[in-house]
Amino acid sequence: MQNPYYNEAKASLIIRKLQPENKEAPIQFMEAPITDHKLFYRRNHFSYPRLAQANYWLPVNGHVRTPKLFSIDELRKLPSRTIKVTMECAGNKRRFFEPKVFGEQWEKGAISQGYWKGVSLHTVLQQAGLKQGAKEVVFEGYDYGVRTDLDAVVSFVRSLPLKKALHPDTIIAYEYNNQPIPFRHGFPLRLIVPQWYAMASVKWLKQITIIDQEFSGPFQTIDYMYYPNKETNDNAQPVTILNVNSIIQKPLHMEILNTGIHPIKGIAWTGKGIITKVEISTDNGETWSEAKIQNQTHGHYGWVTWEMNWKITKKGEFTILSRASDSHGRVQPATPLWNRKGYGYNAIDKVNIKIE
Amino acid sequence: MQNPYYNEAKASLIIRKLQPENKEAPIQFMEAPITDHKLFYRRNHFSYPRLAQANYWLPVNGHVRTPKLFSIDELRKLPSRTIKVTMECAGNKRRFFEPKVFGEQWEKGAISQGYWKGVSLHTVLQQAGLKQGAKEVVFEGYDYGVRTDLDAVVSFVRSLPLKKALHPDTIIAYEYNNQPIPFRHGFPLRLIVPQWYAMASVKWLKQITIIDQEFSGPFQTIDYMYYPNKETNDNAQPVTILNVNSIIQKPLHMEILNTGIHPIKGIAWTGKGIITKVEISTDNGETWSEAKIQNQTHGHYGWVTWEMNWKITKKGEFTILSRASDSHGRVQPATPLWNRKGYGYNAIDKVNIKIE
């Protein structure tokens, strides 16, 4: 007989689109604090790039005193920094917007976290020497393709304002969880921008260019903008810092449970300061109690895990909510800020369950 | 460099629950007419059973003249039958009921199809010889576990009325797609009941018992019943034959496309007769046109594939519908028959798209 004792079920990525590959993490089923690269969500704008086998050099040019080419070895010899970072796609939870929003229907798993090791971008820019008037740093990835709205072939390019670019924790990473960055996640070099939505963390870095003006590329003037109006582009704002957010991992949405004691658990994260409080309601918001936060984020940019035990002796239907607050006074809202492209969803998380 | 040319994205099963393992097929991304066993949806009521390595015998007993024990070899020596069958979980599409229904939130992929080879149950029952008064055939699987509603450990057991049991295409299968049945799908022997929802196709067959009365077990008197009322069990009906049904595989729900020509394609299936028509609307039901059915199901129980090309020159939001009809005059309804446990969803399929 084949495998008669095989009894193990594994979680795997959840497909949203095959070309380009977009898959979310099975976040409800992930207990490990660090995301194995196989379960790291995948968000691509284009087909995977084809990189040359050898001769990988990273140019740093533009508004600098000395344009430079860095080999990976050179970057590895510079002082390194390892940071734990929550990476979240700006479109995470898009499926939950009402009215519905077009685009990849991410549920709650376009988020992952782990350790990125690299060199501070600051260190690299110092070697090139910024000229007076430098204003932004532009990052180009090797990935490219047709944008039908522009009727043009474009690369994935994003910029950072100088202040964020020079933060010591903005790094050019070459390792994820102590291994070379997996190809699908940006090998060999990926920009890592903690606290910003992950579109800022450009994969497959091809070149870095310093400019003396504001960058305008389609991935930050057309996409990754909050458009609060359905029909016009009025009051558009760029997508940058992660909103304060949380999810309930257990119980599962629409699960049927019995009376007794059940753990309610999940994660919470923010792009500003730290998570200070996660409140749980088991009566759809009438009353709240604080969950226990299990690993505070001082000194890193990961998520916290939280948990509480719920004793339920009554049968019926229940709505469980989680609401996180951060040290900048931000609290998850009851209603998300609707926007036409569906970014930054962070309403109070909700699961419905039935006790039988 | 590692894998720099790796550019392939693969579809995989979509997790709904880990314990027991419940995963659906990535049906929108499956082009092959036959489901590879790795992409066959998994629906379990309990943990996977642990089967003894050797000494697998199938008892056929109860209301028979000669109780029998069959080895797999003996069954393989009997005349075989290979049938192409669409297997669909009764809870497929449960997530789309309104009001929402508790339980596994299957979307559209709790369905798969392939070739099952085995011996007609009829042949096996003939060898045992049914006694006068035989009324139902009871199938017990090796899978078992606690049902908290009954506060008891129970096996997965289902029965068939004699007429369905004796249909030559009701088989005891030992192969799927020319290979031994994969363990997760019922190895070594699985009952295959074409045209019924898949709960009838009992996995890991442990024994077959002929009875002279109606069987009542929790998997056909508590579960797998249509309960049209939220609070009472009035007017309950057993879940048996597949409803007429269809899905749109392309385009994807909430996809953003450009003007031009787009294929609209999908599959359709029924538990009664054959699919006679699949109608498509691209204006939310105002007008309909017939899709081309590509492989008719005469002589097997598989699904049909269908396709049409859609030329769209106008920008805006569109709702695409698919509506299948079968040779018994059944047509997918606009609204599904709501039932408390969420079985048999077969409303007209719908995807929303945006043309930019």
Image (tube, coloured by chain):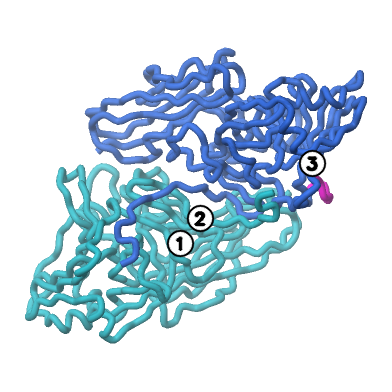
Chain colours: A cyan, B blue
The answer to whether residue B204 is seen in the rendering is yes
Disc 2 chain ID: A
B88 to A131, vertically: above or below: above
B241 left or right, relative to B286: right
Q: Is residue B138 left or right of residue B303?
A: right
Q: Secondary structure at mark 2?
A: loop
Please identify the quarter of the rendering in which residue A6 is found: bottom right
Could you say which disc has been placed on residue A12 in the image?
2
Residue at figure coordinates x 55%, y 36% from the top left:
B112
| 2 and 1 marks in contact (CB < 8 Å) | yes
Cα separation between marks 3 and 1: 37 Å
Quadrant including the N terminus of chain B: bottom left
Residue stretch in magenta: B149-155
In the displayed structure image, the side of residue A137 where residue B78 appears, left or right? right
**Where residue A331 appears, x then y in whole percent?**
44, 66
Could you tell me which chain the residue with mark 1 belongs to? A
Q: Are marks 2 and 1 on the same chain?
A: yes
- Indicate whether residue B151 is drawn in magenta: yes
The quadrant holding residue B5 is bottom left
The residue tagged 1 is A38
Q: CA distance from mark 2 to mark 3?
A: 31 Å
Residue B160 is situated, as x and y percent measured from the top left of the image, at 77, 27
Do badges 2 and 3 share one subunit?
Answer: no
- The amino acid sitting under disc 2 is Ser
Ranked by sequence position, the earlier of labels 2 and 1 is 2
| Label 2 – label 1 distance at C-alpha | 8 Å
The residue pinned by badge 3 equals B206
Q: Amino acid at mark 1?
A: Lys
Which residue is situated farthest in the bottom direction here? A79
